């Protein structure tokens, strides 16, 4: 099967100006379509957006052309895109009688600090995976002439989640491993002096170049190859990856299936990352991992972490193997094949899981930092609750707190001063009319939005932490107030202080984390 040529980037600057002039931006499209129709697009439902774009304005025309991927009258397209002949010559558009069609999906994307960006991908692949291609509607002719295995998806929930998780500190170098349509490289270009983007699919590298060019970002260093092969012997301050993490019985789709057994691709990526990180550098990725019989998933993933690295692993969801297989069979459009073919493929997934004694699949994120610590901190936890995005600043703070706690023994901890974290409130729980509460809860409205139960000492300690008194002096005052032995209280309080610091309820004063 021959692969069609992709658009040329030489007219990207002019196209960007025309798109912006027509308000074909994330904010402009949201204002036009409304929240309900905009959200429906993320579910590959187009009827609400079609109803909202019947007026024929330049913005409505561009929404139909690029988002809904419908043919539009040539005259209307020319009114929205004055240089339409140049865009057609460069392959962004094609004539179809009296109409014009888009050759690629161009999707407005709200960038960092209010920037207007556009993500370029295969037709019909901005959301919903390969299952939407050829399913009718605007995707009926999606990505013509392209093998479905090589499709390049646009921005979706996974890519926006990872973008929000990424630590956005200024760095000298960043690597987007498995760049796809270039979303993570686009973000990295805002805070990294040098950006390298890799992918095993050469079409993905072309799309990434178009995404960055159309969004006005610097051209990245694009390299073809698997995992760290294209950057052998090179190191970076930040590695970010939304890899093909789906655990499947074969490598049918380049964009999602890693082609390795089980979760070996994610494990290999994590284990090899330290060899490509500068000291203090971060590696952040989304991943799926197996839950195997007789082994705790936390211990299993902790064994992936290379020496000298702190790590924070967060499991957001767990699916049983049948749910997981059904999800990705639908993603691949297998539910639209004949029942026998669907059943055979379903059976192959379950056979694979049975052979590996897999009873569930976890999804979440892994962040590791090359701290060089002799006793690194590795935390794996389950957290299915809502979090505040962007979470990157909170993640950076978590690792900074590990440095602080590692370098402060109990005596140093009691000699330190603390302030209460941002937007932390205290809740007292008990029966109405009771003299004392049954327990006290500290609840944070920022970051992970944690809640933790504390005793009377912990609540009193947190309540007076305003940065003026050392922890030791506060403990002594609480001991006097409660009539307790201050020596005993000094012995048992540091453990509680450490937990409150690690979880972000308390912030150390006069301490600067080691720079990346």
Image (spheres, grey):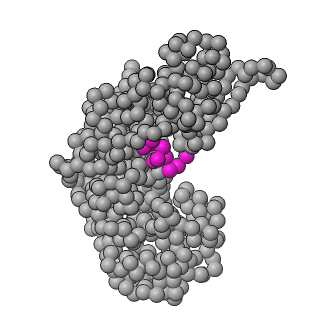
In the displayed structure image, the side of residue 373 where residue 342 appears, left or right: right
In the displayed structure image, the side of residue 460 where residue 69 appears, left or right: left
Q: Considering depth in this image, is 475 or 253 the residue closer to the camera? A: 475
Q: Could one spot residue 59 in this view of the protein? A: yes
Quadrant for residue 372, please give it: top left
Number of marks drawn: 0
Quadrant for residue 57, please give it: bottom right
Task: Find out whether residue 390 is within the magenta segment.
Answer: yes
Give the image location of residue 482, x and y in percent.
66, 16
* Residue in view at x 28 percent, y 55 percent: 173
Q: Could one spot residue 250 in this view of the protein? A: no
Relative to residue 335, is residue 451 depicted above or below? above
Boundaries of the magenta span = 387-397
Q: Considering depth in this image, is 238 or 457 the residue closer to the camera? A: 457
Q: Residue furthest right?
A: 433
Relative to residue 324, is residue 161 depicted above or below? below
């Amino acid at each position: 099967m021959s692969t069609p040529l992709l658009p040329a980037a030489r007219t990207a600057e002019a196209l960007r100006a025309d798109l912006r002039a027509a308000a074909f931006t994330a904010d402009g499209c949201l204002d036009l379509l409304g929240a309900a129709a905009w959200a429906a697009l993320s579910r590959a439902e187009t009827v609400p957006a079609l109803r909202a774009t019947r007026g024929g304005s330049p913005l409505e025309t561009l929404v139909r052309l690029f988002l809904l991927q419908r043919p539009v009258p040539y005259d209307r397209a020319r009114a929205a895109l004055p240089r339409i002949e140049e865009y057609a010559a460069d392959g962004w558009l094609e004539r179809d009688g009296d109409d014009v069609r888009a050759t690629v999906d161009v999707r407005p994307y709200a960038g960092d600090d209010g920037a207007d960006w556009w993500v370029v991908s295969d037709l019909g692949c901005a959301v919903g995976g390969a299952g939407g291609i050829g399913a009718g509607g605007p995707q009926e002719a999606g990505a013509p002439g392209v093998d479905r295995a090589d499709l390049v998806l646009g921005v979706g929930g996974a890519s926006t989640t990872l973008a929000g998780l990424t630590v956005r500190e200024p760095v000298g170098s960043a690597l987007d491993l498995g760049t796809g349509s270039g979303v993570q490289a686009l973000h990295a270009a805002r805070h990294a002096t040098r950006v390298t983007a890799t992918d095993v699919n050469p079409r993905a590298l072309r799309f990434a170049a178009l995404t960055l060019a159309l969004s006005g970002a610097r051209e990245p260093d694009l390299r073809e190859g698997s995992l760290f092969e294209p950057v052998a012997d090179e190191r970076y301050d930040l590695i970010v990856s939304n890899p093909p993490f789906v655990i499947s019985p074969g490598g049918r789709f380049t964009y999602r299936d890693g082609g390795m057994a089980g979760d070996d691709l994610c494990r290999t990526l994590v284990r090899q990352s330290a060899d490509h990180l500068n000291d203090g550098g971060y590696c952040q990725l989304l991943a799926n991992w197996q839950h195997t019989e007789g082994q705790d998933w936390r211990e299993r993933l902790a064994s992936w972490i290379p020496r000298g690295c702190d790590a924070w692993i967060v499991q957001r969801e767990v699916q049983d193997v049948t749910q997981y297989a059904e999800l990705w069979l639908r993603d691949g459009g297998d539910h639209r094949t004949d029942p026998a073919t669907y059943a055979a493929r379903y059976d192959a997934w379950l056979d694979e899981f049975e052979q590996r004694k897999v009873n569930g699949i976890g999804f979440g994120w892994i962040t590791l930092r090359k701290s060089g610590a002799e006793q690194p901190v590795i935390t794996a936890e389950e957290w299915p609750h809502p979090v505040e995005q962007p979470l990157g600043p909170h993640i950076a703070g978590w690792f900074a707190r590990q440095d602080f706690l590692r370098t402060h023994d109990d005596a140093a901890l009691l000699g330190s001063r603390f302030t209460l974290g941002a937007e932390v409130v205290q809740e007292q729980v008990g029966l109405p009319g009771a003299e004392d509460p049954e327990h006290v809860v500290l609840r944070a409205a920022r970051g992970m939005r944690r809640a933790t139960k504390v005793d009377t000492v912990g609540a009193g300690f947190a309540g007076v932490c305003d940065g003026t008194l050392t922890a030791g002096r506060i403990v002594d005052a609480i001991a006097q107030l409660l009539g307790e032995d201050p020596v005993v209280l000094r012995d048992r309080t540091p453990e509680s202080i450490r937990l409150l610091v690690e979880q972000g309820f308390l912030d150390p004063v006069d301490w600067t984390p080691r720079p990346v």
